[in-house]
């Protein structure tokens, strides 16, 4: 029998901060964190424009094996996001329609897989945001090993259990809980600035004076053509 190590679950972020972050677009959260922590390769595979926000339930598993994913879901609490480090391997799916339906029944609010998923038609019928690196019909093995609630790597970004996961059509961002209040404050400021700029664009009055110091524009004229002899 293969061991799957389960470590203590960290405390959740405050409901107030989490609810406020749920209204922040991932692109804005990324800007507020200096465009650093997050994924660039994982894409939404669910249907529609569902977004997600919740603390990470982290899983590390052997590529192509989902024993630890099954164990993790038995420890899931409502509101968590299942985040699976599959080492970027896409030859075998780490979950499909059945396991996603079970995750939803357990109260999981989203799934992030640095690996492949399958049963796409079934996943798209669930009211559950799912992000993955790839899609394949080939199923997983169940021999382990794996860990739950340990730090993992998702598309090159380190994710700790309890990190806040934001997801929308642009992808995924991860926010450490201790940074969440400052990220929220900065993101709300960025949103206010963008809303002001959008109003200026619609009014035809968008000024970008900063361009003068950022780029030296050299305009070239087309050479004059001489008449044929």
Image (spheres, helix red, strand yellow):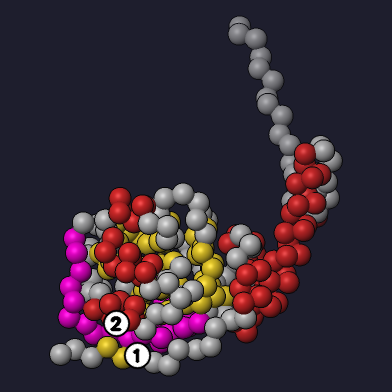
- Does dot 1 land on a helix, a strand or a loop? strand
Please identify the quarter of the rendering in which residue 135 is found: bottom left
- Give x and y (percent) for residue 205: 84, 41
Q: Which residue is mark 1?
A: 6
Relative to residue 155, is residue 195 depicted above or below? above
Residue 60 in the image: x percent, y percent?
34, 80
Q: Main secondary structure of the magenta part?
A: loop
Q: Residue at x 64, y 63 (%)?
A: 24
Residue 114 can be seen in this image: no
Instruction: Say which quarter of the image contains residue 129.
Output: bottom left
Who's the residue at 68% across and 71% down the image? Answer: 184
Q: Is 181 above or below relative to 51? A: below
Which quadrant of the figure has residue 67? bottom left
Q: Quadrant of the C terminus?
A: top right
Residue 207 counted in the magenta span:
no
Q: Are marks 1 and 2 in contact (CB under 8 Å)?
A: yes
Disc number for residue 71:
2
Viewed as shown, does residue 155 lie left or right of 229?
left
What residue occupies the far left of the structure in this picture?
1
Q: Confirm whether the magenta stretch covers residue 140.
A: yes
Secondary element at tag 2? helix
Magenta part of the chain:
138-162
């Amino acid at each position: 029998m293969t061991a799957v190590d389960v470590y203590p679950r960290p405390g959740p972020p405050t409901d107030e901060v989490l609810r406020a972050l749920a209204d922040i677009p991932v692109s804005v959260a990324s800007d507020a964190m200096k465009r650093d922590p997050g994924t660039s390769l994982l894409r939404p595979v669910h249907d529609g424009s569902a977004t997600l926000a919740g603390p990470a339930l982290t899983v590390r598993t052997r590529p192509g094996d989902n024993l630890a994913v099954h164990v993790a879901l038995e420890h899931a609490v409502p509101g968590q996001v299942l985040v699976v480090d599959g080492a970027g391997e896409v030859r075998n799916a780490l979950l499909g329609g059945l396991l996603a339906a079970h995750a939803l029944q357990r109260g999981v609010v989203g799934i992030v897989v640095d690996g492949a998923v399958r049963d796409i038609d079934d996943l798209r019928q669930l009211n559950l945001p799912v992000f993955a690196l790839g899609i394949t019909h080939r199923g997983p093995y169940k021999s382990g090993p794996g860990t739950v609630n340990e730090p993992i790597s998702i598309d090159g970004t380190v994710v700790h259990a309890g990190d806040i996961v934001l997801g929308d059509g642009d992808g995924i961002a991860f926010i450490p809980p201790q940074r969440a209040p400052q990220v929220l404050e900065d993101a709300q400021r960025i949103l206010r600035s963008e809303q002001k700029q959008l109003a200026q664009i619609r009014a035809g009055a968008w000024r970008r004076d900063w361009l003068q110091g950022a780029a030296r524009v050299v305009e070239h004229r087309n050479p004059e053509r001489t008449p044929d002899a």
